[in-house]
Image (cartoon, rainbow, N blue to C red):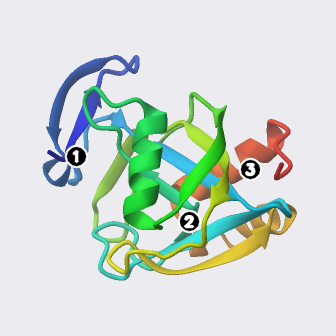
Amino acid sequence: MDDVVLLDAGGRAIGTAPRRSVHTRDTPLHRAFSLHLLDGAGRTLLTRRALTKTTWPGVWTNSCCGHPQPREDESGAIERRLGEELGVRVRGLRCVLPDFRYRATDASGLVENELCPVWVGRIEGEPCPDPDEVAEWAWIGWDDLVTAVRAAPVVFSPWAVLAVPAMAEAGFRGD
C-alpha cells in the first residue's frame, strides 16, 4: 500500500488516495513530512533528487521527505522512508515547523500541495542512498545552507526554499 492521507483546508483527514494518482496538475492537499538530518558537527545532509523523479528531478533538497501512510504517525513514516531512501536511522527526532504548508508547481506543471511538518534529527549510520530516490548527497553547515538557499533558490526544492529560512527565523541553528 502506498496511499497518502488527503486533508481538508483545515488540515483534517478526509480520505486516502494512491500516492501515484495524487500528484497531478490539480494535487489535493495531503499529509507529508520533511526531515533534516544532522551530524555531530551540526552539518545538515542535503540530497539531490534522482533525475528520474517525477517532480523536481535533480534539485537539491533536505535529507529526506515523504508521506505518512494511513494510520502511520510521522515518526514512523520518517523511520520507514529513511531506511528506504538512505539506508540510515535517526535519533533525537523533533519537529521544528509543525504547521509548515506549501503549494508549488514544477516545470512540467505537476503540483505539490502538502501540509508538511519539518523535522530534525541526528543521523545514525552512513548514507547508502537508493539511486531511484537520490542522485547524490553532501554535508553542509547550517549557516551555509541558509545563505545558499537565499542566494540561489532555483537550485533547491521549493519546500527547502521556504522551510530553511523559516527554520532560521524560528531560531534553529543546526543543533
C-alpha distance separating marks 3 and 1: 27 Å
Residue 39 in picture, x, y percent from top left: 75, 62
Quarter of the image where one finds residue 3: top left
Residue 111 in picture, x, y percent from top left: 32, 53
x 49%, y 76%: residue: 128
| Residue type beneath disc 3 | Pro
In the picture provided, is 108 more to the left or to the right than 92? left
Residue 75 in picture, x, y percent from top left: 49, 36
In the picture provided, is 174 more to the left or to the right than 17? right
| Label 1 sits on residue | 26
Q: Which label sits on residue 10?
A: none
| Residue type beneath disc 2 | Thr
Asked whether disc 2 touches disc 1, contact meaning CB atoms under 8 Å apart, the reply is no
In the picture provided, is 31 more to the left or to the right than 108? right
Q: Earlier in the sequence, mark 3 or mark 2?
A: 2
Give the foreground label among 2 and 1: 2
| Residue type beneath disc 1 | Asp
C-alpha distance separating marks 3 and 2: 13 Å
Q: Earlier in the sequence, mark 2 or mark 1?
A: 1
x 62%, y 69%: residue: 46
Q: Nearer the viewer, residue 84 or 147?
A: 84
| Label 2 sits on residue | 61
Residue 38 visible within the image: yes
x 83%, y 59%: residue: 42
| Label 3 sits on residue | 165
Residue 149 in picture, x, y percent from top left: 71, 65
